[in-house]
Image (cartoon, rainbow, N blue to C red):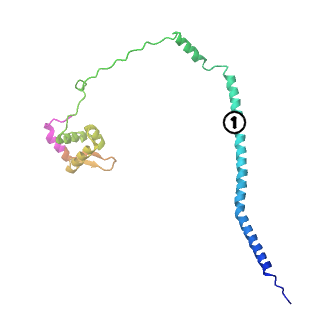
Amino acid sequence: MLIEIPDPDVILSVIIAFLVGLGGLFTYYKLRPMIKTNQNTDTSQSERLEYYERQLIDMKIRLDSIELQGLEEKTNDPNLELKHFIEKLAKNEVNRKPIEPIVKSEIVPKEEQNIPRMPNLHHNNATNYVLHLITDKAMTSRDIQITLKRSREHTSRLMKKLFEDGFVKRNTNSKPYTYSISEKGKEKIGVMESIPTIT
């Protein structure tokens, strides 16, 4: 049996045709998703545009019908009463109340207002004042600050010093902490009763 080998030109042309076919298939499969998505987006965009166009037409029809209803209702003027009132006002038929002049109240000095002023407190006076404040009931640092009319820092330092010196007791079970007078504090203001305190 004799096998005839074709010419090298024929073999080369078959191989080249095969490779060209493979290249064509490869490019087709690579480009096919892009072609499909472009076609799908075109159809989906056209469908979307048609949907919005129908919506716009529907809204236009509704607006036209509302305008027609508005024209029919305008025959009954809702501002008719207002127009009559303005006409009466123009003719001075409306009773006007006389305008009372605004009287400025005189400023009364603080000395004449009988408002108790807190004098400048020295350290001992502030201590005694705070101890007198918390004798009857426990107070928070904020309450004491408002009463003393001092800064938060000043009040905190004062209460810390009084606590460290043992003149006040601090209740840490509640937030914010409350301060009450201790026995040592009661002794201090008991000894100092002869000094006038601030009320």
Residue beneath the point at 71% across and 51% down: 42
Answer yes or no: is residue 138 visible. no
Residue 128 picture location, percent across and down: 19, 41
Q: Quadrant of the N terminus?
A: bottom right
| Above or below, comparing residue 72 to residue 40 in the picture | above
Residue sitting at x 72%, y 37%: 57
> Quadrant of residue 154 in the image?
top left
The residue depicted at 57 percent of the width and 17 percent of the height is: 82
Instruction: Specify the farthest residue to the bottom.
Output: 1
| Whether residue 26 is situated above or below residue 81 in the rendered picture | below
Q: Which residues are magenta?
A: 186-199
Which image quarter holds the C terminus? Answer: top left
The answer to whether residue 36 is magenta is no
* Residue 80 coordinates in the image, percent (x, y): 61, 17
Q: Secondary structure at mark 1?
A: helix
Q: Which residue is mark 1?
A: 59
Is 189 included in the stretch rendered in magenta?
A: yes
Camera-side residue of 168 and 114: 114
**Res 72 quadrant in image:** top right
Q: In the rendered view, would you say 95 is above or below 129?
A: above
Dominant SS type (magenta): helix
Amino acid under disc 1: Met
- Residue in the foreground of this view, choosing between 76 and 60: 60
* Residue under the image location 18 percent in, 42 percent down: 123
Q: Residues within 10 Å of mark 1 (few under 14, many from 20)?
A: few
Left or right position of 73 against 170: right
Regarding residue 34, the answer to whether it shows in the image is: yes
Residue 114 x/y as whole percent: 24, 26
